[in-house]
Image (spheres, rainbow, N blue to C red):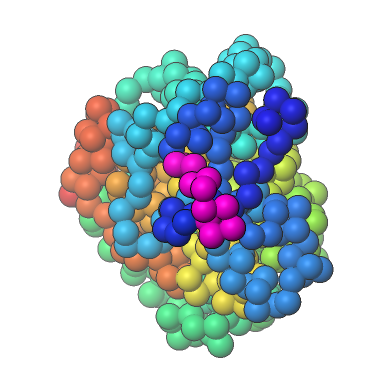
Amino acid sequence: MIDAGLDDWGGISPVTIDHVNPEAPWPEIAALEKECAKAGRPLVERLTAYPAFMAEADRWMEPDVARAMRRHTDAEGLARDNIWSPGLAAPSPGSPDRPLGIAAPAFIAAPHIDAILTRAAAGHTLQEPEITALFATRGSAAETVVAAADELRRARSGEVVTYVVNRNINYTNICSFSCSFCAFSKTSAKSGARDKPYDLQLDEIAGRATEAWNRGATEVCLQGGIHPRYTGETYLSILRAVKAAQPNIHVHAFSPLEVSHGAMTLGIPVMDFLRHLKDAGLGSLPGTAAEILDDDIREIICPDKLNTAEWLHVVAAAHKVGLPTTATIMFGSVEQPIHWARHLLAIRNQQFETGGFTEFVPLPFVHMLSPVYTKGLARRGPTWRETVLMHAVSRIVLQGAIDSIQASWVKLGTDGAAACLNAGVNDLGGVLMNESISRAAGASHGQELAVMDLERAAESAGRSLRQRTTLYNEVSEKSAAYA
C-alpha cells in the first residue's frame, strides 16, 4: 500500500477494539513503525486535522477549536511527540548520550539527507529546500543530522565548551512596541507579565555594573524596552555611566531595534550613531530583535518592529564600524521550517558580506505568558526534536561562516543545554546573574547559574569547560575569580 502511494493509516486506537471491524484488531504502533521504516518512511502521529489544514487553521476551524489544536501541533502541523516545552521545569527528553531522546529508532535509509550533509561539509551553501528537509528529519535520519553537526563542531571547536561571566541589566521594561510574543514589556501587563513597570536610574545601572565587576564579570549585557521617552542620547548616557563606573568591563549592549530607535530620535544615520556608541565605549551588540527574518512572519508577531532588511542593515553597519554582533533566532511560535531556512541563509549571506557575527544563538519561544499564545494564536514553543535540530542544522548551514553555536540554558535548563552539546553546540553563553525576559514569559530555569553548574553540564557531555571573554579571547586572572 505504501508503494502504491498511501501516506496515512487513519485512526489507530491503543485502548479500544475496532467495533466496526472487530475481526481486524488495531495494528501495534511499534510494529507498524518498523514496517513503514522498511519502506523508507517514518511513522508520525498527526492530529484530526491534516497539516495543510493546520497551516490555515483560521480559515478551516472555529476559533476555540483552532486554539486547542495549536496547543498540540508542531512546526509541520503534526502532533507534538511529548509534553516538553522550552522554559518548563520538567527535564528535557534528551541527554548528551542521546540528544534527541530516541531509544533505538527504526532505521530509515535517507540517501537524499546524506547527499545534503555531504554538500554542507564540503562548504557549499545549502538551498531552502535542502535546509527544510534537514529540519523535517525524524528517527534515525534525524540522528544522522545531529551526528553530522557534532562532527563539524568537533572539527572546528574541539572538545572544549566555553562560557562568559556576565550580568544582564534590563534597564526598563516600558516599551512602546507591541510584539505579540513578548511578555516582558509593560504593554504585555494585561497578559500576566510577572514584573511591574520600571525604569532604572543611571546610578542604579552603574552600581549593578560595579557589582558585576566585583564578582568577576567581564561583560555587562544591556537591553531594554523601547521607552517612549528614550532617545539616542539616553543610550549614550547609559553607556557612559557604565564605562565611568567600570572602564575595563566589556559592554555588550543595545539590540538593532534600540540602535535604530536611537539614530532616528537624533536624526542621524544608523552608522553615525553606531560610531558615537563605539566612541563612548560600546564593545559589541546583541543580535536580538531578529525573531524570524521573514517579513510574512514578522507581520504577525512584530508588525511595528524592524523588517528583515532593516535588521540586517543595522548589523551590517555595526560590522562596518568595527562592532561585532551576535545573531539569534526565536523559533517555535507561528512559523514553519521554511522560515527557519530563510533566516539561516540570511545570516550566512550577511556574514560572508560583512563578517562580524561572533556566534549564533537559537532562542526557543517560551509560550506560557506570551500574549500570542494566551490568545490561542501560537504553538507551545518548539518540540524537543525541533529544538535539537535547530542547533544541529544551524551548525551545518553556518559551516564556514560562524564558528560558535550557543545553547541557551535559560530556555532549555542545564540538562537540555547539556544534551545539545553533542548536537553541534560549543558554547553555553553566560552565567547572566540577572535574567528578566525569559522569566517574564514564564520560564522556570532561574536568573543565575554557578560555574559549577556549567561544569557539570560540560562533563556530562564528556567535555571540558573554559571561560572566555565576549569576543572569545582568553580571560584575565581577575575574571576567573567568579564561582
| Identity of the residue drawn at 35% across and 47% down | 93
Task: Please give the name of the residue rendered at 56% of the width and 19% of the height, measured from the top-left corner.
Answer: 109
Q: Magenta stretch? A: 18-29
Instruction: Indicate the position of residue 197 as horizontal and vertical percent values.
Output: 49, 85
Residue at screen point 75% across, 32% down: 5
Q: Is residue 137 above or below residue 206?
A: above
Could you tell me if residue 153 is visible in this image? no
Relative depth, front residue between 376 and 279: 376
Residue 149 in percent (x, y) is at 49, 25
Magenta-drawn stretch contains 28: yes
Whether the magenta-drawn stretch holds residue 311 is answered as no
Foreground residue, 8 or 345?
A: 8
Q: Position of residue 175 (x, y in %)?
A: 61, 77
Would you say 311 lies left or right of 18 here?
Answer: right
User: Residue 454: which quarter of the image?
Assistant: top left
| Direction from residue 222 to residue 345 in the image, left or right | right
Q: Main secondary structure of the magenta part?
A: loop
Residue 95 visible? The answer is yes
Residue located farthest toward the front when viewing the structure as drawn: 23
Q: Is residue 109 above or below residue 342?
A: above
